[in-house]
Amino acid sequence: MQVVNYSHVVSTNQSNVFLPHLLYKNSCDSNKICLDLFSSILDKNSLEEKLKFVKYLPGFIFIKDSSFKFMGMSDSFAQFVGWKDAEHAVGKTDYQVPCKASEYADRFQSDDSKVINSNTKVLNLEIYDFATGWKSTIVQKVPLRDNRGKIIATFCQLFDISNSNMLKCFKKLNSNDQKLINSFKKPSTYILNPERCPLPLSPRQQECVFLLVRGKTIKEIGYILGLSGRTIETYIEHIKYKLGCYTKGQIIEKAIDSGFLYYIPEAFM
């Protein structure tokens, strides 16, 4: 993956927002380790026995069935959202989570549905008011299969990055983006996995639109991406053709309407 070689200016003023690739990579690696560990236990034990083990897993982990009910979770995550321990969460849904994050249960279950019904991995950057206060997290959800390969649940891990500069940066990014659509329904979720990009664009085209929609000029985009203004203009023309647009303003409108505003290209992570 090519990482843009400049401190990424993504706000509408001169404030900088850094999206550290290391935190993103570590969260993905951590999720894979925990999922592999959990799956190895499933190979030797029934699902019921396996779920008993979840409460002892390190980090913020939970598992939901196809009806979006919690089947199990780590004690750490249970306490993170307000339960005394994991046993109190079994059989409950996001609507019953004892913190303000429950207000966004519809959004959580929409992602769960994508995982269960479409065999899609979900990777998001999110900020919510949990039992311990506002937290910025990277959230990864993947399908969990039985021994026959059938998807039976969603396996999720949260990676808390609130102690990094990410929380302040994410809130700044989110605040500016809310102004673009004249909406202040906070918080928002940013999509991180490339396969869920809302528009059919190449990685470089995604980077151009990401910056264009946040008020960057052709010259500024070229400077940030390390390319000439003429090269950026060529990318913009190809983007217009792909999206059926005639002006940069129409590209911005389509990016906002499609949800691309809440997608972060891989190079900016």
Image (spheres, helix red, strand yellow):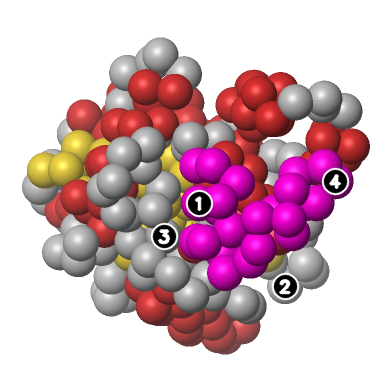
The quarter of the picture where residue 177 lies is top left
Q: Where is residue 98 in the image (x, y as percent from the top left)?
A: 19, 34
In three-dimensional space, the C-alpha distance between marks 4 and 2, rounded to whole angstroms, equals 46 Å
Is residue 225 in the magenta section? yes
The quarter of the picture where residue 110 lies is top right
User: Callout 3: helix, strand or loop?
Assistant: loop
Numbered circle sitting on residue 8: 3
Mark nearer the N terminus (1 vs 2)? 2
Give the residue pinned by disc 4. 238
Give the residue pinned by disc 2. 147
Q: Is residue 171 above or below residue 41?
A: above
In three-dimensional space, the C-alpha distance between marks 1 and 4, rounded to whole angstroms, equals 19 Å
Q: What residue type is labelled 2?
A: Asn
Q: What residue type is labelled 1?
A: Glu
* Number of other residues with Cα within 10 Å of mark 1, as a class: few under 14, some 14 to 19, many 20 or more: some
Give the residue pinned by disc 1. 220
Q: What residue type is labelled 3?
A: His
Q: Residue at x 48, y 37 (%)?
A: 214
Depth order, front residue of 90/6: 6
Q: Which residue is drawn at 80% across and 51% down?
A: 234
